[in-house]
Image (spheres, rainbow, N blue to C red):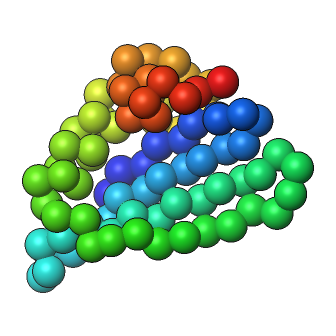
Amino acid sequence: MASISGSIMGDEYIESYYFCDRCQVYTVEVYHDRFLGEEDVSIQGPVLKPEGDAKVELIRQCSEPWNKKCRCEAHRTYFQGWLD
């Protein structure tokens, strides 16, 4: 399991990757806390193992993936430059 948090236009996004050993795929939980509204949670997947492994490896390059204000290379790459 790996999670990363980022702030985009005042909203917080937390994306968490869960791997199923039996199915050999990932499920992604996306939590979106809107600055001016309600939060919501969505589930994405299945995500194929190679793609999920790459995202988890990228997340693990950050020493503080829970920090939505972190601007390390891993955060910037993961969120494709959209961070506040």
Does residue 42 sit above or below 83 in this rendering? below
Which of the pair 46/62 is nearer the observer?
46
Which of the pair 81/18 is nearer the observer?
81
Q: Residue furthest right?
A: 36
Q: Is residue 13 visible?
A: yes
Q: Residue at x 27, y 44 (%)?
A: 55
Q: Residue at x 68, y 67 (%)?
A: 40
Left or right of 43 on screen, residue 83 = right
Which of the pair 70/51 is nearer the observer?
51
**Residue 9 horizontal/vertical position (percent):** 72, 34
Which quadrant is home to the N terminus? bottom left
**Residue 19 horizontal/vertical position (percent):** 24, 67
Which quadrant is home to the C terminus? top right
Does residue 65 sit above or below 33 in this rendering? above
Q: Residue furthest bottom?
A: 22
Left or right of 49 on screen, residue 7 = right
Left or right of 17 on screen, residue 70 = right
Left or right of 40 on screen, residue 44 = left
